Image (cartoon, rainbow, N blue to C red):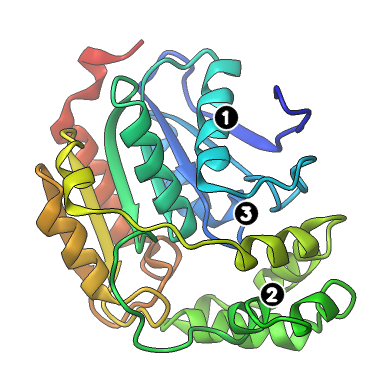
Amino acid sequence: MGDGVTVHLRDEGPKDAPAIILLHGSNADLHTWQPWVDALKTRYRVIRFDQVGHGLTGPDPNNDYSVANFASDIGEVADKLGVQSFVLGGNSMGGGHAVAYALAHPDRVKGLILVDAAGAPIAKKSKGNIGFTLARTPVINRIMNYVTPRSMIEQSLRETVSNEAIVTDAMIDRYWELLRYPGNRDATRRRFSGKWNTFSPQQMAEIKVPALVIWGEDDRLIPVEAGLWYDKYLPNSRLVVYDGIGHLPHEEAAQRSAAYVAKWLDEMNLASAAN
């Protein structure tokens, strides 16, 4: 892209179908969306990519981990792929980036899917998982540039979800290995040292497109009250809350959430407005 970043992405489904871009959360990667991609790619063009400081994309050369820079990357990826308009979805951090992009480029976003998204001005009920807590702790977060035990990754994942059945050895290994990809640990420290971005009701009122807000009722990182906030202030929203599910409904309740998203997309009749 323009800032010298080579983005790791996957672009699946018919190229002439309505496009959906999916953004992963903090310290995740594009694999988090696999269940949704499998369910949607026969009828939609589904694009997902590792955001800077994550996965195989690696760090930003300018160490710019601002929301504005993340949002800019969304547009650059779409431009490179020749996609003018799309439905934009995101989990956690990625959800916040999706909202920021929708505010900046309302002409390109046809719909929003927010999955336990960051950005609502709602206080957290707990400190979250151990990994995020340490990443915010001065001195310790610098040590984590060099020492990141696999056991910490496992504990963090188990503290993130309620359906622990999804926390397999393969999942733990993927998070652990990609965090240790060159530059990603320092990128994590820099992101967590920066300013947290929140939105206002006035900003939400500017987003007129349909918005599907999905939340896990047992989310300990971003409580369900944040989902209620988005649903209250987004003018054209629908809220779906899953009992017994934590921060990753798209993985913890993969089939249920994917089926609901497919139904919601069908209701939007995107095919008539495809590129």
Task: Give how far across and how far down residue 253 sits, in percent.
Answer: 36, 67
**Badge 1 density bin: few <14, some 14–19, many ≥20, Cα 10 Å:** some
**Residue 263, how many percent across, how many down?**
20, 43
Q: How far across and how far down the image is residue 28, in percent?
A: 61, 60
Which residue is disc 3 drawn over? 29
| Mark nearer the N terminus (1 vs 3) | 1
Which amino acid, by three-letter code, is at mark 3?
Answer: Asp
Q: Does the residue at mark 1 contact the one at mark 2 (Cβ under 8 Å)?
A: no
The image quadrant where one finds the C terminus is top left
- Taking the spot 16% from the left edge, 30% from the top edge, the residue there is 268
Measured Cα–Cα span from mark 1 to mark 3: 14 Å
Residue 121 seen in the current view? yes
Can see residue 87?
Answer: no
Q: Is mark 3 on a helix, strand or loop?
A: loop
Residue assigned mark 2: 172
What's the residue at 59%, 62% (across, down)?
Answer: 194
Image quarter (top left, top right, bottom left or bottom right) of the N terminus: top right
Q: Does residue 36 appear left or right of residue 233 in this picture? A: right
Q: Is mark 1 on a helix, strand or loop?
A: strand
Q: Name the residue nearer the viewer: 270 or 222.
A: 222
Q: Is residue 53 above or below residue 77?
A: below
- Which residue carries the number 1 mark? 11
Label disc, if present, on residue 86 of the rendered structure: none
The quadrant holding residue 99 is top left
**Mark 2 or mark 3, which has the lower sequence index?**
3
- Give the left or right position of residue 163, taking residue 2 as reference: left
Q: Quadrant of residue 5?
A: top right
Disc 2 and disc 3: Cα gap in Å?
12 Å
